[in-house]
Image (spheres, rainbow, N blue to C red):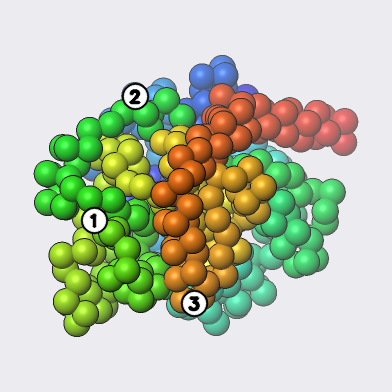
Amino acid sequence: MNILNVNVSADLISGGGAAERNIQMSRHLVISGHKCTILSTGLGMNKGKIAFIKSLNIKLVLLPSIWNRFYIPKVNFYKLNMLIKQQDVIHLMNQWSFLNILVFFFARLNHVPYVICPAGSLNIYGRSRMLKILFNYFIGYKIIKLSSAIIACSDSEFNFFKKCGFNAKKITIIPNGINFDDYMIRNNLFFHNHFKIPKKPFILFMGRLNKIKGPDLLLNAYIKICNSVNYNLVFAGYDEGMLSDLKRIVISHKLSNKIFFIGHVSGKLKFYAYQACKFVAIPSHSDPLPLVLLEAAAAKKPCLITDKCGFPEIKSIKGGLITKDDKRGVKKGLLEIIHRLESDKTMGINLYQYTYKKFSWANVVNNYINLYSDILSMKKTN
């Protein structure tokens, strides 16, 4: 099959988990014998990042961005139309995307089937709320309703789509995947020395410093307990407008010796971060299945998540704890998981064992292949 994977960004910094999912999905489809092209804007990309994607035998088409705030691309409509004509199926990632609108138009024009994976973005949260509501009203919901399939990342997102009125028969659950072997490398001494972090237990936040991810929620909860626990707090992630405010809070409470901001980490530094921490906190206000949770699981680290993360089984498998997505709930959750870790050393192992078979990319990719095969079989019979 010729498969076109579309996302507003192919850069792992600005594109976050959606970009990571898009690249890994493409990588494993190629390994399975299919031809993949990633279509994206060129925002944040450089020669090294481009070379890495191409080294995976993935074709990469980057469009210049003429308005970075909303990832508005400069498009050669003839070339875009020709690219879409060559595809058997198209995968649209995310919801708030002008690029998705363009691809949707040409896919419909050329009768090329497409699927869409909002990946948690359909839930309206944070800034530009009115713009997102208008987007959905005029075009967003139409793109979803006319798709060949809607991909949910978890059971909770499946239920959310049904509540939005989408046809349940078109919704299929394909979770995030992870390359588990990548996360087993460890160099705690290098990590602590490199970032000048004291060699004591720490809680890790890994993700964009964005309101929906809840870094301020975690920070304020930690401040309430920091003097009663022997734990530091490390924020690893790309700043999306919150860093200065978070740092201001830290300075005002004179906690610069306990709370650290190390910026975006990738490659070995990211693997080292997971291995060096005691547990990972995911205080998200909306996330159908946090990729960070799977990354923590691959490193055999337990997680504290909110009830807005789509992984309720973490409690039954004893791989971590679930808390309310408010300051009081996260504060209580931090104290409880720290207390449990004093005697229970199995939570991270439990999470690893449960997720390994279910979320390995080698297995997850078969869901895409089966879905696309079914879509193309139905196209032939119609």
Mark 3 vs mark 1, foreground winner is: 3
The N terminus sits in image quarter = top right
Q: Earlier in the sequence, mark 2 or mark 1?
A: 2
**In terms of depth relative to the viewer, which is nearer, 144 or 359?**
359
Residue located beneath label 3 in the image: 328
* Callout 2–callout 3 Cβ contact below 8 Å: no
The residue that appears at 65% across and 53% down in the rendered structure is 312
Rendering coords of residue 361 (x, y %): 54, 30
Residue bearing mark 1 = 263
Whether residue 375 is visible here, answered yes or no, is yes
- Residue that carries the numbered disc 2 in the rendered image: 55
Element type where label 2 sits in the image: helix
Dot 2: few (<14), some (14–19), or many (≥20) neighbours within 10 Å?
A: few
Q: Looking at the picture, tell me which residue is in the foreground, 226 or 252.
A: 226
As helix, strand or loop, the secondary structure at mark 3 comes to helix
Q: Nearer the viewer, mark 2 or mark 1?
A: 1
Q: At 56% across and 65% down in the image, what residue appears?
A: 323
Which quadrant of the structure image shows residue 308? bottom right
Q: CA distance from mark 2 to mark 1?
A: 26 Å
Measuring 44% from the left and 64% from the top, which residue is drawn there? 335
Q: Which residue occupies the extreme right position in the image?
A: 381
Residue 22 appears left or right of 124: left
Separation of marks 2 and 3 at Cα, in angstroms:
47 Å
Residue 25 drawn at (x, y percent)? 52, 34
